[in-house]
Image (spheres, helix red, strand yellow):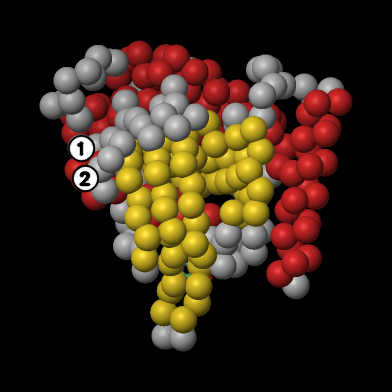
Amino acid sequence: MKVEIAALNHTFFTPQPRPALLNLDLHIPSGQFAAIIGPSGCGKSTLLRLIAGLLQPTSGSILLDGKTPAEANAARQVAWLAQSPALLPWLTVEGNIALARKLLATRLNHQMSVQQALQRVGLENAARAYPFTLSGGMQQRLALARLLIQNAGLWLMDEPFAALDEITREQLAAMLLDLWQPAQPTVLWVTHNIYEALRLAERVIVLSPAPGQMVADFSVALPHPRREDTPAFQNLLYEVRTALNQAVEAAA
Ligand SMILES: Nc1ncnc2c1ncn2[C@@H]1O[C@H](COP(=O)(O)OP(=O)(O)OP(=O)(O)O)[C@@H](O)[C@H]1O
């Protein structure tokens, strides 16, 4: 799904005006895996919420394959993964996925079974368990299975693995890449972590401190799996970090 954002502004009124995003123009081609990084409070989550149609922009436009966020949502084309997996505690692992599948039963190209989705995330042996009996990493794998079965054209990800330990986080990041590669939905991945962004994404977009403006846009043309100890990775790391630091200094 193509994401086209033009002259986007968002201000919260609390009641005093608090600008969160300023004049953002962004074009994400269909199938791109893009990471959005920026300092805390720069408007990353606000941007995702606007794209998901959970907030109305103060001004500007967002089009998802030519549709408004509300229209794309109604067609169930937008899937969301956040830090909290928002599982239904009264349903088993397979019950959670079966419900997500049922909600999408009218989608013509929807062919994946519950079992297949659980296999893809390595949870086939936990199908009868309840979410509260799972570790944090397993709960996020279940959320990934739900994301997969939604078969949406756009995945919005708001630091989904930030609460997990380093090793689980890396495992899930690798799993996410494996899940993304066959169908290649468009991914917008919000993160604070420059390493994570450079390990996964094809593009890294840097926002300034609030109100968030785009200050840099990097293409990451490195093959997977990416090794951090290569000069190409280290160069990009340096450039992204420098862009971020300059934006923070300019705003200070
Ligand atoms: N519902 C709200 N009402 C008022 N202000 C808000 C609201 N949500 C966010 N803000 C403000 O908008 C700005 C951007 O917030 P946002 O959560 O989008 O930032 P973020 O980059 O995602 O931050 P973090 O990385 O810490 O999660 C901040 O100044 C925040 O305080």
Instruction: Point out residue 12 in the picture as x, y percentages from the top left corner.
Output: 43, 74
Q: Quadrant of residue 150?
A: top left
Quadrant where the C terminus is found in the figure = bottom right
Q: In which quarter of the image is residue 233?
A: top right
Instruction: Point out residue 85 in the picture as x, y percentages from the top left corner.
Output: 43, 43
**Mark drawn on residue 129:** none
Residue under circle 2? Answer: 71
The answer to whether residue 191 of the structure is visible from this angle is no
Q: Quadrant of residue 56?
A: bottom left
In the depicted structure, whether residue 123 falls above or below residue 208: above
Q: What residue sits 48% from the left and 52% below the top?
A: 25
Instruction: Point out residue 125 in the picture as x, y percentages from the top left corner.
Output: 43, 16
Q: Nearer the viewer, residue 2 or 118?
A: 2
Q: What residue sits 56% from the left and 67% below the top?
A: 211
Q: Nearer the viewer, residue 140 or 71?
A: 71
- Element carrying mark 1: loop
| Image-based side of 80 in relation to 250, left or right | left
Instruction: Check disc 2 and give the amino acid type.
Output: Glu
| Image-based side of 157 in relation to 192, left or right | left
Density class for disc 2 (Cα within 10 Å; few <14, some 14-19, many ≥20) is some
Q: What residue sits 25% from the left and 14% below the top?
A: 111
Instruction: Point out residue 217 in the picture as x, y percentages from the top left corner.
Output: 63, 43
Density class for disc 1 (Cα within 10 Å; few <14, some 14-19, many ≥20) is few
Residue under circle 1? Answer: 75
The answer to whether residue 103 of the structure is visible from this angle is yes
Quadrant where the N terminus is found in the figure = top left
Q: Is mark 2 within 8 Å of ligand 1?
A: no
| Image-based side of 55 in relation to 176, left or right | left
Q: Is mark 1 within 8 Å of ligand 1?
A: no
Check whether the beta carbons of the residues at disc 2 and disc 1 lie within 8 A of each other. Answer: yes
Residue at the left extreme, as displayed:
106
